[in-house]
Image (cartoon, helix red, strand yellow):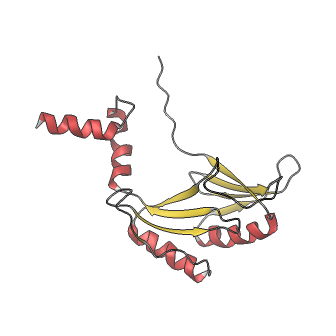
């Protein structure tokens, strides 16, 4: 059987209750964080596309108007990855200067001993996060070709390495 490899997330679409209000929010945030914008309509409907070299975030008008509930089925939150804690701190500063009230960046050891992040919300209450790249993510990338198990591959690989020592 051929093994496929997905490379990453290509794009994410968010439906928003007020496209004008959300576009103003995302324009300020995404421009400040270094993304670029496209405004090509799709199917005759206005969309705002925010792009990086590796992914795209698009917002569009929702067809039904109700506030986002992260505990209902669907999107819980959206997390962007920064390369370092210094970059997370820089993003926090930018978001603060934009008046968005992000949480103070801090470690969240309940997720991972190195998990360092800040959180903020968009106008519809969609929780957005910026996290620093951890050694766990680096190891996943570097050792990907060595994974042969589906469940907890990095843990399995580490255990085999410890057993060999």
Residue 153 screen position, x and y as percent: 34, 36
Residue in front for this viewpoint, 5 or 117:
117
Question: Residue lying farthest top?
Answer: 1
* Quadrant (top left, top right, bottom left, bottom right) of the C terminus: top left
| Direction from residue 106 to residue 93 in the image, left or right | right
Q: Residue at x 68, y 67 (%)?
A: 26
| Direction from residue 109 to residue 162 in the image, left or right | left
Q: Residue at x 53, y 59 (%)?
A: 80
Residue 87, quarter of the rendered image: bottom left
Residue 52, quarter of the rendered image: bottom right
Q: How many marks?
A: 0
Q: Is residue 163 depicted above or below 47 in this figure?
A: above
Q: Residue at x 40, y 58 (%)?
A: 133
Q: Is residue 3 depicted above or below 101 in this figure?
A: above
| Direction from residue 155 to residue 120 in the image, left or right | right
Residue 103 screen position, x and y as percent: 50, 74
Residue 22 screen position, x and y as percent: 74, 67
Residue in front for this viewpoint, 9 or 64:
64
Residue 93 screen position, x and y as percent: 51, 79
Question: Residue lying farthest left?
Answer: 165
Question: Residue lying farthest right?
Answer: 44
Q: Residue at x 59, y 54 (%)?
A: 76
């Amino acid at each position: 059987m051929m093994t496929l490899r997905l490379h990453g997330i290509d794009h994410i679409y968010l439906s928003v209750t007020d496209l004008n209000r959300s576009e103003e929010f995302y324009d300020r945030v995404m421009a400040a964080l270094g993304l670029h914008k496209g405004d090509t309509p799709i199917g005759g409907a206005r969309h705002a596309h925010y792009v990086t070299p590796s992914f795209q975030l698009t917002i569009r008008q929702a067809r039904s108007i109700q506030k986002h509930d992260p505990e209902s089925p669907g999107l819980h939150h959206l997390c962007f990855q920064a390369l370092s804690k210094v970059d997370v701190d820089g993003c926090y500063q930018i978001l603060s200067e934009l008046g968005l009230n992000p949480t103070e960046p801090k470690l969240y050891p309940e997720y991972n001993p190195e998990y360092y992040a800040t959180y903020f919300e968009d106008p519809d209450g969609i929780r957005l996060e910026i996290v620093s790249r951890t050694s766990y993510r680096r190891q996943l990338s570097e050792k990907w070709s060595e994974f042969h198990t589906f469940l907890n591959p990095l843990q399995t690989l580490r255990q085999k390495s410890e057993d060999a020592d």
